[in-house]
Image: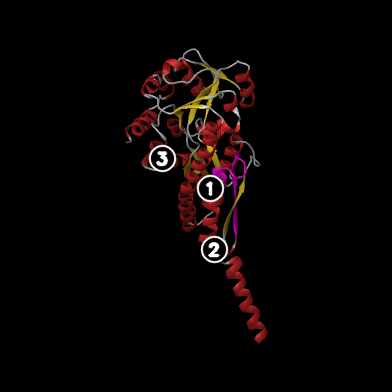
Amino acid sequence: MNLIRKFTAAAALSAVLFGGAAYAQEITLKSSDTHPDGYPTVEAVKFLGELVKERTGGRIAIEVYHSAQLGEEKDTIEQTRAGVIDMNRVSLGPFNNIVEETQAVSLPYVFKSIDHMHKVMDGPIGEDILKAFEAHDLVGLAFYDSGSRSFYNARKPIKSIDDLKGMKFRVIQSDVFVAMVNALGANAVPMPYGEVYSAIQTGVIDGAENNWPSYESSKHYEVAKHYTLDQHLIVPEVLVMSKASWDKLSAEDQAIVKAAAKESVAKMRALWAAREAASEKTVRDAGSEVVTEIDKQPFIDAMKPVYEQFVKSDKLKDLVSRIQATE
């Protein structure tokens, strides 16, 4: 009789731990990032995972696949929408043709500064854009930083819009980038990133544009020693989750994941700021000339035809207006 009681008790305990309660079953979420291990976004998602694991008593773990192990951004977006990948850190650029709202924050000079971008993305506008992902089988969790893109060249310091006239700048293969550079009076030259160093060195192009860490890590500062902080593009990055994976979580666990994602933003920004500072020091120590004071208004005014070309729907017009009205 005692043996039967013991067996029954053990069976009941097993049911509670492994069958009757989903809470006892560990969930591992796969998270993708194209950046290398140690990069601020990768470390931020690892931090998010630590918070989630702690707050769920180890029931939910997040495994970060960095260095494009699960594919390039375009491919991982589709896999995340399909539920094959659970979480994904992606630049907003690849989402421009999927989630229309992301186009508003991918426009040149739409943000006045990094602080302005933070104010917008941390507020109601950012929340509205995150919600827009749900119509595309995704849940928007948080926005991360990717710094600001500025012009650099081998010929001369750029101190005004007039200095850009006739110069040739490499851009990524994007209609917005091409239109932006041409509107500033320069000539846009779409070109693979790996060809930029030699193209500047041989005079095929005068320069390019990018953020501090990219300017430094690519060694472009060796051949293009004039860097002007015009900050023409400040495009956030986004952390999303598959709607299919999200719906498998309880409401309580969803709240834990969402709160942890928001907390990971501060971690990411601190890591990014440190990385930018290190890159800037390397560049300055190497003798590059950095122009920090520049009147941006003529640059902004020159974007009118670009906005007319790309901001056509009422939805985008409203978003851009709200962004520009944010102090």
| Circle 3/circle 1 CB separation < 8 Å | no
Q: Along the polypeptide, which appears first: circle 3 or circle 1?
A: 1
Instruction: Kindly identify the residue that appears in the image at 63 percent across and 74 percent down.
Output: 11
Q: Along the polypeptide, which appears first: circle 3 or circle 2?
A: 2
Q: Along the polypeptide, which appears first: circle 2 or circle 1?
A: 1
Q: Which residue is mark 2?
A: 57
Name which residue type carries label 1: Ala
The answer to whether residue 261 is above or below residue 91 is below
Q: Is residue 250 visible?
A: yes
Dot 2: element: loop
Magenta-drawn segment:
26-42
Name which residue type carries label 3: His
Q: Nearer the viewer, mark 2 or mark 1?
A: 1
Q: CA distance from mark 3 to mark 1?
A: 17 Å
Dot 3: element: helix
The x and y percentages for residue 236 are 47, 37
Q: Which residue is mark 3?
A: 118
Quarter of the image for residue 50 reads bottom right
Dot 1: element: helix
Q: CA distance from mark 2 to mark 1?
A: 20 Å
The x and y percentages for residue 167 are 51, 15
Q: Which residue is mark 1?
A: 44
Instruction: Kindly identify the residue that appears in the image at 51 percent across and 41 percent down.
Output: 272
Q: Is residue 94 visible?
A: no
Q: Which mark is residue 31?
A: none
